[in-house]
Structures are given as C-alpha cells and as structure tokens.
Amino acid sequence: MDLVLHVGVMICLYAILATSFNLLIGFSGLFAFGHATFYALGAYTTAILTQRLHLPFPIPLLASMLLTGGVGLAIALPSLRISGIYLIITTLALQVIAIDIIINWTSLTGGPSGLSGIPPLSIGGYVLSGPAHFLPVAFAAAVICFLVARHIGNAPFGRALRAMRENESAAASVGKNIFYMKVSVFGLAAALASVAGSLFAHYLSYVGADSFQVSETVLILSMVVVGGTGNLIGSVVGAAFLVLLPEVLAFVDLPQGFEGQLRLLIYGCVLILFLVFRPEGLLREPRRGGRRVAAGATPIALSTKTAFVGPLLTGTGLQKRFGGIVAIAALDISLSAGRITGLVGPNGAGKTTAFNLLTGFLRTDAGEIRYKGKVLSELKPHELVRAGIARSFQDLRLFTGMSVLENVLVALPRQSGDRLSALFLRPGSVRREDEANTAKAMGILEFIGLGERAMDLADDLSYAEEKLLVVARLIATEAEVLLFDEPLSGLDGAAMQKIIDLLRRLAADGKAVCIIEHNLDAIRNACDHLVYLDEGRALAQGDPNTLMADPELVQRYFR
C-alpha cells in the first residue's frame, strides 16, 4: 500500500513540474531546457532553511518561490534576444552550471553527498511523515498549482502568450509587450516548479544533485509532450502516465540479467511511438474562444475623427542603411486622416523598410518621425501601437494556431488581464472586461464578414478570409494610423473590391490608411494619394491618375 501512496505523491510532484513547464513550452513557445534547475533551487532552499535555520512551514516554501522566481526572471533575459536551438543551449548550459555549483559548494549544499536529515513537513504541530500523511498535501499543492496555471492560461495574459508563441513580431504589432510576457512567464514557471522541489525535500528528507540532472528536465519535457503541449490537463495525464509506466514495467517478466536494460528499451520505444503516431500528445490543445457573450455582438463604432489639424503621421528625412546598402535615403512621407495613401515602386525600392521605420521595427539612422506633431523617439513597436500606429505584414503573420475570434480579441487595447497583478488581485473585473471585449471582437468580425468563422482556427480560413482577418485585427487595435503591406495581393476581383470598400470605410471614419500595393488597378481604385518610391527615395507624390500619366514614371514602373 505504501508503494501505491508513494507513486501518488510522485505523480502530484511531477504534475506540478509538468504543468509549470507547459506554461513555458506549450503556451509561450519558449523551449527552455533547464526546468530541473528551478526544481533543485526549491528543494535546496527549503532544505537549508528548515535544517539549518529551523524555519517553520510555510516560510521555506515562500522563500523558495521568491528565490526561484527571481532566478527565473534572470534566466528570461537571454530569451529576449535568442530563441530556438540557441535558447535550448543557453538554458542547458545554465542547468549544467547549477549542478556544478551544487556539487562544489560543499559548505552550503553538502556537495556530492547532498543534504540529509531534512525535517518532515509540519503543519500546525502535526508532522506529515510517510506517504499516507504526505499525499493529501501533495495533492492539494498540485491542485492549487494547476488552478493557478489554468487561470493564467485562460486569461488575456495566456492568450497573449499563445500569440507570442505563434509569432513574436505579430504579437508586438498588436500592442503586446514581449519583454514583460517572457520575463513574467519565466518567473512564474520557476516559482511553481519550486513548489515541487520544496515538497520533495520534506518528503524524502534528502536532496542531492543526482535528483536534478539534465535527465530530469528530459523526463519533465516528455510528460508535457506525451500529455499534450498547450493542454494543462494533458500535463497531469502525461505526468501520471510516465510515473506509472516504470512501475508497471517492473511487473513485466523479463529475462534475468537484462531486466533493467530491457525495461529502459521498452520505456524509450513507448515514447518514440507517441512522437510518431501521436505527436500532439494524448490530449490536443483545446480550441479556445473568448468569454461567453451574454447579449450577442456589440455594434462597433469605427469613428476616430480627431481635432488634430495636419497629417497624423509624418516622416522627414528618413534614412536607413544596412552595411553599404542604402535602403531608405532622405524619405519624406505624410499620412493624413481620412485619406488612403499608396506606397508604390519596384521590388527593393524600400517600401517595407519604410513601414518598419514608421512602426518601430527598425531604428532610423537619421530623420524624424512625428505622430500628431510629437516626435517619436526610441518607442518600441508595441508602444507605437498603443500610441495609435499599427501595421500588417506582407506574409500576414496571423496566429494560425488560435481561433479567428482570438486573433481579433488579442489585438484589443488596454486589457487589464494582460497584467498578472490584475489577474490575481481583480479577477472579477478582468472576467467582466473580457466578456465585453469578446462582444466587441465579435462585432468587428460581423462587420468584416467573418462572424460565422469566429470559432474556427485561423489556419482553416481561405486566403481571402485570411486577408479579411488581417484587416479585422488592425481595426481591433483602435489605432488611428493603419499601415497595410500588400492587403490586396493574390485576391480575385470580388475579394479585392471587398477589402477596398473596407479600407475606404476606415478612411471615411477618420483613419489614416497607407497601403503597399503592386496592382495598378487596385491602386487607382483605392488610393487618394500616391507616393512613388525608388532606391529609397520618394521620387514623386500626388494624385494617382496624375502620377500614372507621367511619362517618366510610366517608363519606369506604370507600364
């Protein structure tokens, strides 16, 4: 019976680890490979505080969470500049360093011998020794950690994490603070993992470096993959499956002398079969929408007419070099409310670079950008979106793994649920706000003509519908300046006209709209003003019909 209870305790501890790791990998797309480091920090902090300082519960647990959360914040900093295989290597190196410190800092950690004789958990004077007494505590901790992770995953913050997972630049282009999200989720995942480490130290009364090797991170990762990335219930199922599997294999009658090796072989084959035949895990990532809409879609009000006189956005003398290549040279451009400006020119003329400069994705080498007369300096892309300047991308960059509704919902500005503090201090307010935002997002989809596709994955849309969703997402930002990179390319006549009508409606409602486009008929149809760009310079500006009749420009481009 003790064996069954012991297995139950280990399932609970690994469920905490897998759930917290899933926040990093499944929700955020941050493939960090040092989760056992957080596990170890929680265990050693608790061991030292209880064994040497005799601090009572829950002080060691809280101290473990604070310390490990702080280390998680520090580890997040490399992930701000690197990703993919480089993030794996960096976090793997950090774990190796952590193990070396544990082994060599003998006076603090006990070195290779570890720390033994750790006092058992004591709550209210009741000593919880043995699996029978410890299991309820481990189970309660696993439930609390799961509920915390689920609360985050289902909130606007979790939605923003998944948008970042899909495409960081696209998330920034709808106003999401990538720095804040990465640092926060690393710190949170680390703090949750430390809970398992703290309980582990009390339960076994011993901690040693051998319990927190790289293989432990691989095991936790396997639990997430087997259970299903992006699915927190899957993390619990994966933890239970991989904790139980070795115990079940122990009862399999195998040839003597080879039992251990054969059991490892079977264990590995089971994991490989999962990866081949069920790569999404036992449980797929759930298809999420927004909060329940109580009274249907709320009609949207697009009007943003401003009292500001003059162009909303201007660029003066903009310059950008890439080494010896001049991408933008002394470019002057102005975008006014109520007008659709077309940016045209041959491939390589600098059109997309101009968009990147105006929206903060690139820094200017020289020149000045003003919004409503105020100079914009050193603002990041998400800050410019919040100020009122939003853009799309030529390759769309939709959040394809999210629903159509979520693609719009995540772009709505001023969501208090994007902040972890609001999620836990004002959950009711966040819930009500999210319900209202869901209604607003549905209103935008109805306006754009995608209301019936709200709960479908963005990846399931046709190309024309994807283009419409790009427009809907920019509308949701509530920005006054909207920059569209080739919104009409690849569309048939009817779909093209529908988007042109939408752009005209946006301009009529007070938006300053700028588009990059190559289709001359579409340009003539849609634009009120044209800027001809070549070799990084605005060679001509004016009425589309006038520019298209200019003999020199006809020879160079309009032919």
Image (cartoon, rainbow, N blue to C red):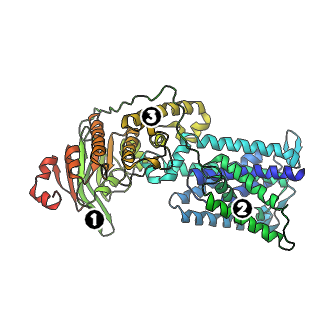
Which class describes the residues within 10 Å of circle 3: few (<14), some (14-19), or many (20+)?
many
Residue bearing the label numbered 2 = 216
Q: In the displayed structure, does residue 15 sit left or right of residue 515?
A: right
Which class describes the residues within 10 Å of circle 1: few (<14), some (14-19), or many (20+)?
few
Name above or below for residue 461 compared with residue 212: above
Provide the secondary structure element on which disc 3 rests: helix
Tell me which numbered mark, 3 or 2, is placed earlier along the sequence: 2
Tell me which numbered mark, 1 or 3, is placed earlier along the sequence: 1
Say whether marks 1 and 2 touch (CB < 8 Å).
no
Q: Label 2 sits on what residue type?
A: Glu
Q: Position of residue 403 (x, y in %)?
A: 49, 43
Residue at image point 86% right, 49% down: 131
Which class describes the residues within 10 Å of circle 2: few (<14), some (14-19), or many (20+)?
some
Q: In the displayed structure, does residue 118 sit left or right of residue 396?
A: right
Tell me if I can see residue 49 in this picture.
no
Q: Label 3 sits on what residue type?
A: Met
Q: Label 1 sits on what residue type?
A: Val
Please name which of the two marks, 1 or 3, marks the residue nearer to the observer: 3
- The residue closer to the viewer here, 15 or 498, is 498
Tell me which numbered mark, 1 or 2, is placed earlier along the sequence: 2
- The residue closer to the viewer here, 314 or 225, is 225
Residue at image point 83% right, 60% down: 115
Name above or below for residue 332 compared with residue 311: below
Residue bearing the label numbered 1 = 326
Q: Position of residue 554 (x, y in %)?
A: 13, 57
Provide the secondary structure element on which disc 2 rests: helix
Q: CA distance from mark 3 to mark 2?
A: 44 Å
Residue bearing the label numbered 3 = 442
